């Protein structure tokens, strides 16, 4: 199984790589090279930071077209984490609005509270949707690590799991081969390891 | 419910990890020594986050720091925040590529706000923690940069406002007077300042036992408690503290067995 972590130059990819390796996968590559990405049997799209910057880097590296081909046509499993999850969606309201990769009918909106702190940071409980293959073996509420200022919104049926911070928001989704987690499984102790293992084994 | 966090801060200087007391450093051991004697990676299972600060006094050589950082990040499945001596976007990139999930900034908050803004633009505010060291001086609270050596010419309330306006993600508020003493957190200052903050607050300086951590975790406006006290907490100190905190039903995260 060839696993590729897509590198578009934003944030820490190293901890994700070492976590996947810890789970026993030996063939993990961090790359933005199209021919390497083309050979992947599974893809990871991590990242933190600016949605707008990330999309412009992805387009500059011509990764948007290749990802469309691999994910939509060839149904290669992909796990988007944090900003990576948001990039899989239609758009974000960051900086007045930007288009995402558009694989999932959803929008990203900034948290807007008067009485709660932003970013939403720390472990928070997620009510895991048991119909999703990514959540196999979990029951009820489980703690995962979040750190983000934007949330994903969707009215589509995409096997969402929810977390609450000033209202429910989408903590993860699973639409066939496309999985997104707003939380960081690679930073969520044994709960995260279990979820990553599900991605490696169930897709 | 959003959980409160327990954070351990490793104080690095010149390839060694240190016990700091009022910002005076005492060498404890290097990373291999730490792993052998304290089973550091085991202990991380009982933590929510780890912060690693390069407190080397003169030349904060970031290349050797990043190499040590990389050794820590293997088999640790919690967020790691690193910093100390970040002076450019390239420095930030190097630490992220060495396994840092977030960066902790101190002196450049004051000296180079433009660089801080660039970091926010690139990595997002949620990736950046503002470290604010303070001590009581003639009855007032003064903030310091540069490992506690340079006093900032701004009162602490204004300085916190200024830092929050840089759109940094979290505040790490550290009492130099309490640092490494084990006397407990400086709640008189913390309670006063915490009410004015809009960003998540991590408190540091003074924790010496589980009860100190509990006193911090019980405060509504405190989001995380940190300790850098190797002597008091490493070994089974943190393990027992977390178990005690869970048994008291305080709001902290739980995860499955290894």
Image (cartoon, rainbow, N blue to C red):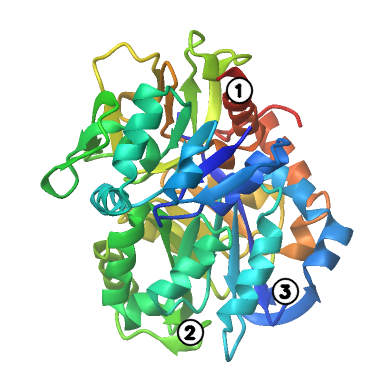
Q: Position of residue A173 (x, y in %)?
A: 40, 22
> With B23 as the anchor, is A69 left or right in this view?
left
Q: Is residue B153 visible?
A: yes
Same chain for the residues under marks 2 and 3 in the image: yes
Q: Residues within 10 Å of mark 1 (few under 14, many from 20)?
A: some
Q: Position of residue B175 (x, y in %)?
A: 53, 70
- Residue at 55 percent across and 18 percent down: it is A135
- Residue at 30 percent across and 34 percent down: it is A151
Q: Nearer the viewer, residue B152 or B118?
A: B118
Vertical placement of residue A133 versus B59, above or below? above
Single out the residue that lies furthest toward the bottom: B58
- The alpha-carbon separation of the residues under discs 1 and 2 comes to 46 Å
- The alpha-carbon separation of the residues under discs 1 and 3 comes to 39 Å
Single out the residue that lies furthest toward the top: A131
Same chain for the residues under marks 1 and 2 in the image: no
Q: Image quarter for residue A107? A: top left
Q: Chain of mark 1?
A: A
The residue beneath circle 3 is B18
- For marks 2 and 3, the one nearer the N-term is 3
Quadrant in the picture for the N terminus of chain A: top right
The residue beneath circle 1 is A198
- Residue at 38 percent across and 55 percent down: it is B194
Q: Chain of mark 3?
A: B
Q: Chain of mark 2?
A: B
- The alpha-carbon separation of the residues under discs 2 and 3 comes to 17 Å
- Residue at 11 percent across and 46 percent down: it is A96
Q: Secondary structure at mark 1?
A: helix
């Amino acid at each position: 199984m060839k696993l590729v972590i897509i590198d578009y130059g934003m944030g820490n990819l190293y901890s994700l790589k070492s976590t996947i390796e810890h789970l026993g996968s030996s063939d993990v590559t961090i790359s933005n090279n199209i021919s390497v990405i083309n050979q992947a049997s599974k893809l990871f799209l991590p990242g933190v930071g600016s949605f707008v910057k990330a999309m412009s880097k992805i387009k500059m590296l011509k990764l948007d077209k290749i990802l469309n081909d691999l994910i939509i046509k060839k149904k290669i499993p992909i796990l988007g984490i944090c900003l990576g999850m948001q990039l899989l969606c239609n758009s974000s309201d960051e900086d007045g609005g930007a288009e995402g990769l558009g694989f999932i009918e959803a929008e990203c909106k900034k948290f807007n509270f008067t009485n709660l702190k932003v970013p939403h940071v720390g472990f928070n409980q997620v009510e895991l949707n048991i119909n999703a293959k990514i959540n196999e073996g979990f029951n009820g509420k489980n703690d995962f690590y979040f750190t983000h200022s934007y949330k994903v919104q969707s009215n589509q049926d995409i096997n969402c799991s929810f977390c609450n911070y000033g209202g429910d928001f989408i903590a993860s989704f699973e639409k066939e081969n496309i999985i997104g987690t707003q939380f960081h499984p690679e930073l969520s102790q044994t709960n995260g390891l279990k979820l990553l293992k599900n991605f490696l084994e169930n897709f | 419910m959003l959980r409160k966090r327990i954070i351990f801060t490793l104080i690095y200087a010149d390839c060694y990890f240190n016990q700091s007391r009022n910002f005076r450093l005492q060498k404890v051991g290097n990373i291999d020594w730490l792993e052998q004697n304290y089973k550091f990676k085991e202990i991380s299972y009982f933590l929510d986050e780890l912060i690693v600060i390069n407190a080397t006094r003169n030349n904060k050589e970031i290349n050797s720091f990043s190499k040590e950082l990389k050794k820590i990040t293997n088999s640790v499945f919690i967020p790691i925040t690193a910093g100390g001596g970040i002076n450019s976007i390239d420095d930030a990139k190097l630490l992220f590529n060495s396994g840092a999930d977030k960066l902790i900034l101190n002196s450049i908050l004051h000296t180079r706000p433009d660089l801080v803004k660039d970091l926010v633009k690139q990595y997002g505010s949620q990736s950046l923690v503002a470290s604010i060291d303070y001590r009581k001086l003639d009855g007032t609270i003064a903030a310091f940069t540069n490992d506690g050596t340079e006093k900032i010419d701004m009162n602490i309330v204004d300085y916190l406002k200024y830092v929050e306006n840089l759109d940094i993600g979290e505040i790490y508020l550290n009492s130099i007077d309490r640092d490494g003493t084990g006397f407990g957190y400086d709640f008189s200052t913390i309670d006063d300042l915490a009410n004015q903050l809009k960003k998540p607050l991590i408190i540091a300086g003074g924790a010496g036992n589980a009860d100190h951590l509990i006193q911090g975790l019980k405060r509504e406006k405190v989001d995380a408690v940190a300790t850098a006290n190797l002597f008091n907490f490493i070994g089974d100190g943190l393990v027992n503290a977390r178990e005690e905190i869970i048994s008291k039903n305080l709001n902290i995260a739980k995860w499955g067995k290894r």
